[in-house]
Every structure is written in structure tokens, then in C-alpha cells.
Image (spheres, helix red, strand yellow):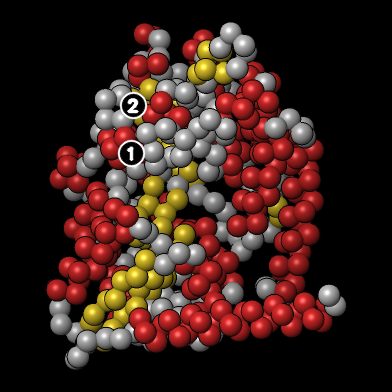
Amino acid sequence: MTSKFAVSLAVCAAVMVVAAISGELVVQRRGIPNRVTILYWEKWTGAEGEAMRAVVNNFNASQNRIFVRYLSISSVDQKTMFSTAGGDPPDVSGIWQDQVCEFADAHALTDLTEMAKASGLTRNYYIPGYWDPLFYKGKLWALPSTPASVALHVRQDLMPPDANTPETFPKTIEGLDALVDRISKKNPDGSLQLAGFLPSDPGWWNWAWGYYFGGKLVDGDRLTINSPENLRAFEWVASYGKRFGNKEVQSFQSGFGTFASPQDPFMTGKVATEPNGPWKANYIRVYRPGIKWFAVPFPHPADRPDLADRSNLSQDVLVIPRGAHHPKEAFEFIRYIQRQDVMEGLCIAHTKNSPLRKVSEHFFKVHGNPYIRLFDKLARGPGAFYPPQIGILPKIQDELNVAFESINAGEKTPKQALDDAQHRLEDQWRIYKLQVLDK
């Protein structure tokens, strides 16, 4: 196949995708008389999707000018980008915080700065760690739907008496490592029966390990993937492969069930501790309501007490794609979701903490996570951090996942893996700056 023919095929495929999405949009935009119809695409399904549908229904019933048509869409990020390129996007789209800079650099988003300011939504209304990552290059590109912070979940029934409460659980990473050595168990054949902790469970935030050791991934315009702090973090990750055996860990993990199931390793007691978001409480309540557990801040290196109470923040966000038919009405709907009562109701339904600076006592009292005050405190604290604001963030996350897997499997040393990631990402960042940022 010639390169020209391959390019032609790719262009035709993209055109066909845009045409299909545009045709679907025409059907979805069918409105009701005397109202402006807003098309809202969201990624959620199941209970989370129904919770947002209830918010939409309440908004539609609260006034008679705007009607929001809510649709659960798979691959919502890709379809939003394609439809925006085709000139016929939805009016509101629910994407992930990690994609905001990439979408903004691609000129795929509507600037919300002035609309937010006029409606009273400023940095003072939000917890800074949720507002700041949405403010990029001097403009506001998104607003929160539901956020999260991360804490270490601990199976209380699998802990020794001297570590079975939040107060007595180890505060340092060295203390955690020593505890893991005490409580982990192997079968007679040498296979793992219980792991006190595994860096690969659940394995969703491999980009964040360096931050728990004082590192970061971007410094100004420079990538710092293989910095000494990040290297220290991944050497610690590698220590767990040495502790249990790389092949043994891989074999052990192959028997794990999915996260949203009774076979989740934390539920079954195969893993005694796990970093996760506040939503974990909901899955415990549904699938293993009898287990005893608690949540604590992730431990810090013993020589870095300044890194206590570190927590990586993430959030689902709402954007108005560039070229949306009704941006003012779309923002009115997004503004409705930012109301304290509406936001708290949605976050309770999703078992998450609130992104708002002001939170009611009622929110804490009725919340389904008994440790929700901890997640709220971590999000507000000086140890809260979020992914770097850079357009190639998804590529950075992918490369660090590759590095993590190669280290976890014993295929590369941490230095080799991070050096390789640094080299590949520097090339991608250089190309991105030339082709996207015109630098």
C-alpha cells in the first residue's frame, strides 16, 4: 500500500466518521416546541448515568426555556473531537480533566472565562485543586461535574492489632513496606496468597508515583520524566517485584476479578491495601458489605515529612465544544450543575467528594463513604496535586504505563524504563510544539 493511498483511506475514513456522527446529531437534536434544545453527551452508564439523568430531568422541569437532551455516549472524547472537526458538535460534552489541554490546544473548546465570571463562578467558589487545572493559558475551558481525591484503603480485618486503625497504621512508606512483609502470605508452592500491597493494584495512576516522592513530570517547558525523584519512586515500585517475584506477581494478578465485582482483589482479601477514590466505598457496600475497612492518606517517604498527606486529584468535567449551536443556553445548564445543592446531590449519588469550597454538613452526614471528610480534607490540603497541564498528557500517561509494566515484569530497570520514556516523549513533545503550538 502506497503512503498516498494510506493517507487517502485515512481521510475517507475520517470523513465517513464525521458524516455518520453528523447524521446521528440531526436525529438527536429533535427538540420540543418553544424550547431551545441542548444536546448533552456524557460518558456515564449504569447508576452514574442515571444520577446525571435525574439532574437533567430536574433542570428541564425547573424552567420552560431550555430542554436538555441527555445521551450516554461511548468514546465520548473521540466523538466530541470528530463532531467538532465536522462543524456540528453537541452543545455540552462530559470528558475527563486529563484531556482539557489537548482539546484546548486543538481549538476544540469554547472559552468559558467570561460566562463563568458573569455568573459568579470564580476560583473562590471551588477547591483550588479542581479549578486550577481547568484554567489553561489564561482561559477557563471546563467546569467540574464530579471530582475525586485518592487515599489508601485498608482491610482492617487483615491488619495486625498494632496497625488496624487509622491512627496506628504506618505513616511512612518504609513503615508500609515493613507491614507488607509481615502480613503478606504465600502458598506452599511459593505462589502469592495475600499481598499486603501491590503498586499495580488498581494501576490507574502510574503517572502519579513520582509525585509521592517529591517529583513532577513537567518543569516549565521541559519534561522531567527521569528525574531523581521519579526514579526513586519507580525503584520503590520495582522493589515489589523483587519482594514477591515478578512472575509470581503477574500470575497472582491474572486471577484478579474486575473492579466492579465481588471478585475485586480488595473485596476477596487477596490485596490488603489499595489506593483508590471515594467511590470505592460504594462498591464495597454493594459487593462486600460485611468487610471492615478504613481509609488513610497514602504514606510518605520517611526522609520527606513535607510530603505527608499527598493525594492525586482527578475529575470529570463539562465542556462546550467549539461551534456548539447554543453556547449560552449550554452554559446555563452547566451553571445549574455548579449550584451547591445540585453538585452535592450528584456527588453523593456518585459517592465522590465535592469540588466546591463550601460544603454543607448535610453532605457529610448522608454521604455513603464513612471517610468522606478525609477525601475532602486531602483535596483541600497542600499535598493535593493533579496531572501537569500539557497537551501531550495522554501520551505521557501512556508512556508511564508502558514503563511501569516493563518494570513490574522485570523486563527493564527503572532507569532504563524512564530514560526510554523520556527520550520518546521528548520527540513527541518537540513534534507537538511544532505542529500544534507553532513553536
Near-viewer residue (39 or 261): 261
Q: CA distance from mark 2 to mark 1?
A: 14 Å
Name the quarter where the N terminus is drawn. Answer: bottom right
In front of the other: 321 or 223? 321
Image mark for residue 283 = 1
Marks 2 and 1, the one that precedes in the sequence: 1
Say how many tags the image has.
Answer: 2
Of residues 292 and 375, which is closer to you in this image?
292
The kind of secondary structure element at disc 2 is strand
Name above or below for residue 171 compared with residue 9.
above
Q: Residues within 10 Å of mark 1 (few under 14, many from 20)?
A: some
Can residue 347 be seen here?
no
Q: Position of residue 67 (x, y in %)?
A: 24, 80
Disc 1 marks which amino acid? Tyr
Left or right of residue 214: residue 439: right
Q: Secondary structure at mark 1?
A: helix
Give the residue number, with chain letter if any, for mark 2.
294
Which residue is drawn at the image coordinates 45% and 85% (left, top)? 23
